[in-house]
Amino acid sequence: MPHSAISRTVAASGPLRGAIAVPGDKSISHRALILSALAVGTSRIAGLLEGDDVLATAAALRAMGVGVERTGDCAWAVHGVGVGGLLQPDRALDMGNSGTSARLLMGLVASHSITAAFTGDASLSRRPMARVAGPLRTMGADVTASPGDTLPLMVRGLCPAVPIAYTLPVASAQVKSAILLAGLNTPGITRVTEPVATRDHTERMLAGFGARVTVEDTPEGRVISLTGEAELGPQDIVVPGDPSSAAFWLVAASVVPGSDLTLRGVGMNPTRTGLLIALRLMGADIAELDARTVGGEPVADLRVRHAPLHAITVPPELAPSMIDEYPALFVAAAFADGRTVARGAAELRVKESDRIAAMAAALGANGVPAREHHDGLTIQGTGGGSIPGGGTVATRLDHRVAMGMAVAALHARAAITLDDASPVATSYPDFFPTLAAATMQEPTP
Ligand code: S3P
């Protein structure tokens, strides 16, 4: 589908106040659809993120014979076909902007007797797929990719595939999940070792669906072992709020004077809370209220109040648990007292955009000095005052660059223009209306 850019200008706002229910977790929403598709019977999902990325997963599952229907606001029913039951799609699977859809579904196809072509937008077509194609080829799938192991690509699955024991060379939950999903329809034990722990939603949800999966902490790292061929029973799933979407409000309310904002139902899985830790190290005032469990995941309400932020050296070991939150963190650093150094996050170069280059350029265009390293940024903060602003941001098909710089604009002396705000729809379709409500501004068309 051709992409039409929608530019948007964001001006400084008053304090953010009131309460926001952040949308469903993107990672968990993908997994809820996929595992429901492989269960025998009907699963119901509440709180599904209805963003373009998750809808791409839903459409691909439909194309492979799964009944997926919307039954209400963020409520979906999935009529699963059982492990091994996916059908040959009659057209290419369009993954849009979604790396998670592409990589997880490649794993799924790899152990079915079907062949599927995967396409995506310009951003996704630049992202590395060798990290998934490699282990899936070892399991017996035939992956024919474009030069540089990128999309468009074709996966011809093998059934039965060969179980593997694989140690992740990069800290990637998508690679881990692709292998485990391939392992579902593979006889024997598929084992993934992760030297550095990544988000664990796949393992948690596999256990919830009744798969035989074990997780062990060993000197080599976390070892996840899955016994195939699995039989999954249908589930009722409640998707918690996405901490990666909450991130923008945590930063916005921290930096805009007078703010006092409550975020309801935010996922607090420890593999996702790195930004919370980093912001607290910077002096942010964030209280966790009503800690509870939703859908097998820890959840809390977060009350965030404006507070002066101090520059820090971001502990590199936090990177896997805040990998999607660096654009928000960089914006917090722009308002901190001193120079924030965030390194050890080279993976940012291969996200929806090269987030190190994109954020350095975006901040620089708005008067915030940011120096690039191969694995991060050093950012000079204002000490709490507003940033100059007034620049135009190239969002580079990256939702988190767009939302991060929209937050920066809230405390800028001149309005900031996003050359294209449309990517926000991939993970947070209601971002701008929510911003308008929290700042009590009228939304611009
Ligand atoms: C995701 C894993 C992360 C993250 C992405 C979602 C997932 O990617 O950046 O937004 O749902 O598994 P990597 O697996 O590449 O680290």
Image (cartoon, helix red, strand yellow):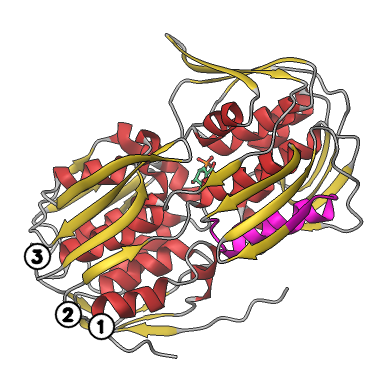
Q: Which amino acid, by three-letter code, is at mark 2? A: Gly
Q: Residue at x 19, y 41 (%)?
A: 313
Q: Residue at x 8, y 62 (%)?
A: 383
Label 2, label 3: how far apart the Cα atoms are: 15 Å
Residues at badges 1 and 2 in contact (C-beta under 8 Å)? Answer: yes
Q: Tell us which disc is closer to us: 2 or 3.
A: 2
- Measured as percent of width and height from the top left, residue 92 is found at 84, 57
Q: Residue at x 42, y 8 (%)?
A: 219
The residue wearing badge 3 is 384
Counting residues from the start of the chain, the first of labels 3 and 1 encountered is 3
Label 1, label 2: how far apart the Cα atoms are: 8 Å
Asked whether residue 98 appears in the rendered view, the answer is yes
Q: Secondary structure at mark 3?
A: loop
- The stretch of residues the image draws in magenta is 48-68
Look at the image and say whether residue 368 sits in the magenta stretch: no
Q: Tell us which disc is closer to us: 1 or 2.
A: 1
Q: Which amino acid, by three-letter code, is at mark 3? A: Gly
The residue wearing badge 2 is 14
Question: Does residue 353 appear to the left or right of 137 in the view shown?
Answer: left
Kindly identify which numbered label has been placed on residue 440.
1
Q: Tell us which disc is closer to us: 3 or 1.
A: 1
Q: Quadrant of the C terminus?
A: bottom left
Look at the image and say whether residue 52 sits in the magenta stretch: yes
- Measured as percent of width and height from the top left, residue 339 is found at 15, 52
Counting residues from the start of the chain, the first of labels 1 and 2 encountered is 2
Q: Quadrant of the N terminus?
A: bottom right
Q: Nearer the viewer, residue 352 or 12?
A: 12
Give neighbour class at mark 2: few <14, some 14-19, many 20+ (Cα, 10 Å). Answer: some
Counting residues from the start of the chain, the first of labels 2 and 3 encountered is 2
